[in-house]
């Protein structure tokens, strides 16, 4: 679908809608718009808008979202600049900033913003704040994890405040507290928490409970290196 056809279709739909401000212009842009729309075009821009997708299988195929509130629906592809995501399914695309309240993230790249709750199935997390939710798989590069369940994936850095780590590969970062069920810890700082099982290759262990697992090497909070696990330290 070309740009002229997209703009024409958006303007046609807009004529039947009531808006407190401007609606679609000839460029296919929506500004200061609040209402309900069936989005069928593959390109377009949205600015400071509130959209509610219908439950008739209509979805967002592609485009750029500049701001506003997404109530529900399916996001297939595109770039999210900023705004609030209340609920829905994100299939793929790039999230640059904003607040994610709930929903299912299938894959894509998260650049920055706040994740409040939901299910993350796969993708790349580059930075931001994770409040709560379920992480099924993917790559975590940086940012702050406050609480939730990590099922599997690779973590390259950042800060872990609390939660449950079930499995995965911890490359580096700061672990403050929580429960480690299983997985591989390669480097980083362990502040406190409960380690149940897994392989510890290296890093700094400051405090916590070690129950079982394989300890290769590591240092305590004084910088002393140990070849045996913390439960054997004196």
Image: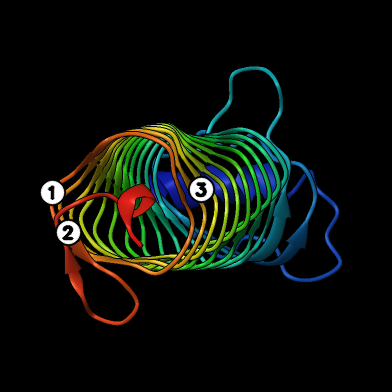
User: Circle 1 is placed at which residue position?
Assistant: 216
Using the numbered discs, state the Cα–Cα distance from disc 1 to disc 2 in whole angstroms: 7 Å
Labels in figure, total: 3
Q: Is residue 223 above or below residue 229?
A: below
Q: Residue at x 83, y 60 (%)?
A: 19
* Residue 155, placed above or below residue 38: below
> Where does residue 125 sit, x and y in percent of width and height?
35, 55
Q: For the N terminus, which image quadrant? A: top left
Give how far apart the Cα atoms at labels 1 and 3 are: 65 Å
Do callouts 1 and 2 mark residues in contact (Cβ within 8 Å)? yes
Looking at the picture, how far across and down is residue 65, in whole percent?
A: 51, 59
- Residue at the (70%, 21%) spot, across then down: 55
Classify mark 3: helix, strand or loop: helix
Q: Residues within 10 Å of mark 3 (few under 14, many from 20)?
A: some
92, above or below 35, in the image? above
Residue visible at 20% across and 51% down in the picture: 228
Compared across the picture, whether 105 is left or right of 155 comes to: right
First of labels 1, 2 by sequence position: 2
Q: Name the residue nearer the viewer: 8 or 154.
A: 154
Q: Which mark is residue 202?
A: 2
């Amino acid at each position: 679908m070309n740009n002229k056809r997209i703009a024409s279709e958006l303007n046609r739909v807009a004529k039947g809608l009531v808006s407190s401000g401007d609606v679609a212009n000839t460029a296919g842009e929506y500004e200061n718009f609040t209402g309900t729309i069936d989005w069928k075009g593959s390109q377009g821009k949205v600015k400071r808008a509130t959209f509610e997708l219908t439950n008739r299988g209509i979805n967002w195929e592609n485009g750029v979202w500049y701001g506003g509130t997404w109530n529900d629906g399916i996001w297939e592809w595109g770039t999210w600049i900023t705004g609030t995501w209340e609920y829905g399914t994100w299939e793929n695309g790039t999230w640059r900033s904003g607040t994610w309240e709930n929903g299912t993230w299938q894959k894509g790249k998260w650049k920055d913003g706040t994740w409040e709750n939901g299910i993350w199935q796969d993708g790349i997390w580059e930075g931001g704040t994770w409040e709560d939710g379920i992480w099924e798989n993917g790559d975590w590069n940086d940012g702050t994890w406050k609480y939730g369940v990590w099922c599997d994936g690779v973590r390259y850095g950042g800060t872990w405040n609390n939660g449950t780590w079930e499995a995965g590969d911890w490359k580096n970062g700061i672990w403050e507290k929580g429960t480690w069920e299983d997985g591989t810890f390669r480097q980083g700082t362990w502040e406190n928490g409960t380690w149940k099982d897994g392989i510890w290759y290296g890093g700094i262990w400051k405090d916590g409970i070690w129950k079982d697992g394989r300890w290769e090497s590591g240092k305590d909070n004084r910088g002393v290196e140990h070849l045996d696990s913390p439960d054997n330290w004196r």
